[in-house]
Amino acid sequence: MEIVTRFAPSPTGYLHIGGIRTALFSWAYAKKNKGKFILRIEDTDVERSTQEAVEIIKNGMKWLKLDHDDDIIFQTQRFDRYKELIKALLDQGDAYYCYTSKAELDQLRELQVSQGIKPKYDGRWRPEENKNLPDIPDNVQPVIRFKTPQNGEINWKDLVKGEVAIKNEELDDLIIARPDGTPTYNFCVVVDDWDMKVTHVIRGDDHVNNTPRQINLLKALNAPIPQYAHLSMILASDGQKMSKRHGAASVMQFRDDGYLPEAVTNYLARLGWSHGDDEIFSLSELAEWFDFDHITSSAAQFDKEKLDWINNHYIKNEPVDKLAALIKPRLIDRGVSRVETDILNDAIKLYQDREKNLNTFADDILFFFQDIKVSDELKNKYLSEKSKSLIRAFVGELEKVNWTNDDVDKFIKAFVKYEDIRFPEIAMPLRVIITGTDNTPSIGSIIFIVGIEVVKKRISVILE
């Protein structure tokens, strides 16, 4: 049997990280078993679905390198198939027309809540033997409801949660077609999974309540029932559900915030799943190692510091030319008119080990490409009359140095020894004047990269 998994987002908003983790695990399981991974856009909610959201889904999957098999499937292109099977359920007595108005449903719900009863449809239009149905009203367009079995229970062995059982009496008669005839989410999902031969449905545990309804539908259609794996939620650091107020809830926001796709997939894979003590692994390794036995059934908690640590690992190991291609547009966005390739590459090599994301990376090396402003706080802290005198002497001798990184470093050390001062007494004032900050890598390397003319210009601005 070919393993078939699917990722089936609705194009009604941004692509959130819980959805991407679902896609990641579905992708990994299909790849591990040399199966098929399907991308299906569930766009039956025509009013809320947008083309912009579709593009966000496609771009997010592409950015994370989660390649799907075959063409993308859109539910709105399959309405004829859904209507065909809804008619079949009507014909075989497993579905019926319901003329209950919204006002009547609201009234029913209020009554049940007041009586302490779990709100659900009361089956007033459900055809039964020896039951007289109400007269069909003139002003109500009917929905079509599935005739849920009233006895027994639905049980399945969830690949994450273990044995799950829900009594049919807890379920109401699910609406499978709206008044305008369009099919509803739960029905379309069932038909799609059947037609696309999906063997494993991997999704968030907010869908657990949908599963018994969908299994009942599959049984009525005489369709095979896939295996289900319901993943725990991802919570924010404060224990609440992830949202925009917690930062990058959307996967494309991670890209905009300067994270590498390899770091995001690595982190999300580790968020609820483990492979021993391994923290860093590639997509191909995930596909090789992935299993359901090591998925936790408890909620995972998002940890930005851990994501930053993983992102730093990938930045440190990324080729300089690839980093340059990602950082250059960020420098341009910050007002740099001309980015010299040699300077950018040297700056990246110097800062690569310390950076957590591409945005702060661009911020930290911005001084290589445009004039800087030194704050009064830093001036007062580091630029005394003594340090200014040392800088004048330093720059006068610096012009005589053979311009290599090693020679600049040797000169600074020799200057410190000649003047009989501690290294920070010259390094910190120079660092502040040239970079505008007191926290940088090697000042000798910085001086070499920016060049003697820039060094002289920035020193003269301060000393004058």
Image (tube, grey):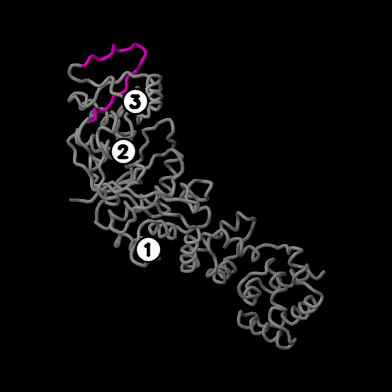
Helix, strand or loop at label 3? It is: loop
Query: Which residue lies at the image location 40% right of the left edge and 23% below the top edge?
Result: 106
Closer to us: 178 or 146: 146
**Number of the front mark, 2 or 3:** 2
Please name the residue that numbered disc 3 is placed on: 178
Marking on residue 210: 2
Check disc 1: other Cα within 10 Å, few if <14, some if 14-19, many if 20+: few
- Amino acid type at circle 2 is Asn
- Count of picture labels: 3
Determine contact: label 2, label 1, CB under 8 Å. Answer: no
Q: Which residues are magenta?
A: 131-148
Residue 430 position by quadrant: bottom right
Instruction: Look at label 3 and name its amino acid.
Output: Arg
Q: Is residue 231 magenta?
A: no
Q: Give the mark nearest the N terminus, 2 or 1.
A: 2
**Three-letter amino acid code of the residue under disc 1:** Ser
Relative to 357, 107 lies left or right: left
The spot of residue 415 in percent (x, y) is 71, 85
Residue behind mark 1: 282
Q: Earlier in the sequence, mark 2 or mark 3?
A: 3
Answer left or right for 391 relative to 438: right
At x 58%, y 60%, the residue is: 360
Nearest to the eye among marks 2 and 1: give it. Answer: 2
